[in-house]
C-alpha cells in the first residue's frame, strides 16, 4: 500500500504536467487560424490587392491511424469521398494520407487542400470523417489582373509575399494568426458545441501606395501599344509628380497576372516566366541617352555657363580630342538658341555645354541628381545604376 501511495505521489508531482499535456493533446485539436492579409490600395483608396475568404482541409494523421485500427480501409474511404468533392485524383489524396516523415514515422498532420469554396467545405463537414478538420483560409485576389503586377508582386499558397510590395511589406500585411483549441472524440473529430479556447487572429495592416490607378491604366495602355508598334522586347515607363516626387505610375511590358503568376502562356522556359516578375523600372540599369541632357542643361544654367543670348552652331558633327562625334540629325541643326538645342536634343550643342562646364562641375550635378546611387524607393532589388569614375573621364567621355 505504501509503495502504491509513493507511486501515485511520484506520478502527480513529478510526471503530472507531462501526463496532463499528453492527455490534453489526445482529447483536443489545435488548429491555426490564418489572419486576413491587409489590402493594398492606390492613393485614392482603390483596391489593388485584397484577400477573399475561403476554407481549407487538413487531416490529423493520428486520428486516421486510430480509426485504421478498427477499419483498415479508412484511408481509401477518406480519399475516395474527398476526391468526389474536391475533384482531385483519389490516388493523389491517398498518397497524402500515407505520407511519412523522413525517419519513417507517421506525419502529424497533412494539408489536403487549401482555398476550397463554402459548398465543398459543407459537404466535407457532413461526412464527419475521422481526422478531417475544416478551417478558415484566404485567397489573395488582384481585381485588375495584370495592372501594376510587377509593383504589387504576389503571394504563395501560404499567403507569404514573394515579389513586389507583397514581399517588401509582408510583415505588415500578413498579421498574426489565431488558434482554435477544440475538444475531440476518440477519433479526434470535433465535438459539437465544444470549443475550449479561441484566440482571435490579428488581421494585417492595409498599405496605401502613391500610385494613381487611373494614371496607371493610361500608362499601361500606352506602353502596351509601344511594345506592339515598335516590336520591342520590353517597354518601361514611370510617371512622377514633380512637386512631391510621388510615383503616380510605374509599369513595364511584358508583364504577368498575379492571380496566376506561374502561368507559362506561350513561354517554354520557366526562367522566362520569372523574368516577367522583375520590376524593370528599378531592377534594370539603362544608358540614359538623351535624357541625360537635362542634367547638362540644368548644370549649365545653375553655374551661369549659358544664357538666352547664346547661339550654338551645329553642322552635324564636332571633333573632340581627335575623335569626331555626330549629331543625330544628318547635316546638323544650324544656328540655335539654348532653348532650341534642348528642343532639338542637339548632340553638338550639348557637347559645347559639356566643354564649358568641365568634368568637375558636371559631376557635381551628376551626384546631386543621384546618379550611381539608390533612390531609396521602398521596393525590393533596386539597382544602384552605373556612374563612370571621374578620374576616367577625359574630353571625349565628357562630350
Image: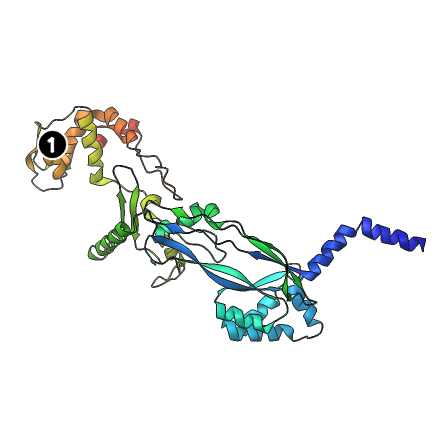
Q: Is residue 399 visible in this depiction of the protein?
A: no
Hey, which residue is sitting farthest right in the picture?
Answer: 1
- 56 or 119, nearer to the observer: 119
In the image, residue 258 sits, relative to residue 75, either above or below, namely: above
Quick check: can you spot residue 54?
A: yes
| Up/down of 155 relative to 306, above or below | below
On the image, numbered disc 1 is attached to which residue?
Answer: 338
- Find residue 13 and report its horizontal and vertical position in percent: 81, 48
| Apparent side of residue 240 relative to residue 117 in the rendered image (left or right) | left
Which image quadrant for residue 347?
A: top left
Expressed as whole percent of the image width and height from the top left, the position of residue 119 reads: 49, 71
Q: Residue furthest front?
A: 193
Quadrant of the image containing the C terminus? top left
Q: Residue at x 12, y 26 (%)?
A: 307
Residue 335 on image: x %, y %: 5, 33
Residue 117 vertical placement versus 293 (above, below): below
Quadrant the N terminus occupies? bottom right
Q: Position of residue 59 (x, y in %)?
A: 60, 65
Amino acid at each position: 500500500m505504501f509503495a502504491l501511495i509513493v507511486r501515485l505521489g511520484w506520478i502527480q508531482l513529478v510526471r503530472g504536467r507531462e501526463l496532463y499535456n499528453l492527455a490534453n493533446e489526445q482529447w483536443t485539436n489545435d488548429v491555426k487560424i490564418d489572419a486576413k492579409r491587409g489590402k493594398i490600395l492606390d492613393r485614392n483608396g482603390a483596391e489593388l490587392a485584397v484577400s477573399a475568404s475561403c476554407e481549407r482541409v487538413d487531416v490529423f494523421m493520428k486520428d486516421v491511424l486510430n480509426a485504421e485500427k478498427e477499419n483498415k480501409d479508412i484511408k481509401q474511404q477518406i480519399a475516395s469521398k474527398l476526391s468526389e468533392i474536391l475533384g482531385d485524383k483519389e490516388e493523389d489524396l491517398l498518397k497524402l494520407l500515407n505520407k511519412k516523415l523522413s525517419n519513417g514515422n507517421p506525419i502529424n498532420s497533412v494539408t489536403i487542400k487549401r482555398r476550397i469554396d463554402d459548398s465543398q467545405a459543407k459537404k466535407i463537414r457532413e461526412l464527419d470523417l475521422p481526422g478531417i478538420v475544416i478551417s478558415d483560409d484566404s485567397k489573395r485576389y488582384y481585381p485588375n489582373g495584370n495592372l501594376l503586377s510587377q509593383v504589387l508582386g504576389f503571394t504563395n499558397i501560404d499567403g507569404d509575399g514573394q515579389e513586389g510590395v507583397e514581399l517588401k511589406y509582408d510583415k505588415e500585411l500578413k498579421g498574426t494568426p489565431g488558434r482554435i483549441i477544440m475538444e475531440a472524440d476518440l477519433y479526434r473529430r470535433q465535438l459539437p458545441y465544444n470549443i475550449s479556447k479561441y484566440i482571435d487572429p490579428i488581421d494585417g495592416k492595409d498599405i496605401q501606395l502613391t500610385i494613381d490607378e487611373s494614371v496607371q491604366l493610361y500608362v499601361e495602355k500606352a506602353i502596351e501599344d509601344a511594345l506592339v508598334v515598335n516590336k520591342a522586347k520590353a517597354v518601361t515607363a514611370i510617371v512622377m509628380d514633380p512637386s512631391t516626387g510621388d510615383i503616380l505610375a510605374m509599369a513595364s511590358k511584358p508583364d504577368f497576372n498575379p492571380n496566376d503568376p506561374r502561368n507559362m502562356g506561350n513561354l517554354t522556359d520557366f526562367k522566362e516566366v520569372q523574368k516577367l516578375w522583375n520590376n524593370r523600372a528599378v531592377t534594370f540599369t539603362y544608358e540614359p541617352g538623351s535624357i541625360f541632357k537635362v542634367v547638362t542643361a540644368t548644370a549649365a544654367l545653375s553655374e551661369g555657363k549659358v544664357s538666352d543670348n547664346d547661339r550654338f552652331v551645329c553642322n552635324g558633327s564636332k571633333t573632340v580630342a581627335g575623335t569626331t562625334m555626330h549629331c543625330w540629325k544628318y547635316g546638323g541643326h544650324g544656328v540655335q538658341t539654348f532653348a532650341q538645342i534642348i528642343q532639338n536634343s542637339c548632340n553638338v550643342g550639348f557637347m559645347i555645354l559639356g566643354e564649358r562646364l568641365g568634368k568637375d562641375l558636371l559631376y557635381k550635378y551628376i551626384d546631386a541628381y543621384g546618379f550611381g546611387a539608390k533612390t531609396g524607393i521602398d521596393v525590393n532589388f533596386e539597382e544602384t545604376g552605373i556612374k563612370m569614375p571621374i578620374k576616367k573621364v577625359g574630353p571625349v567621355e565628357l562630350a
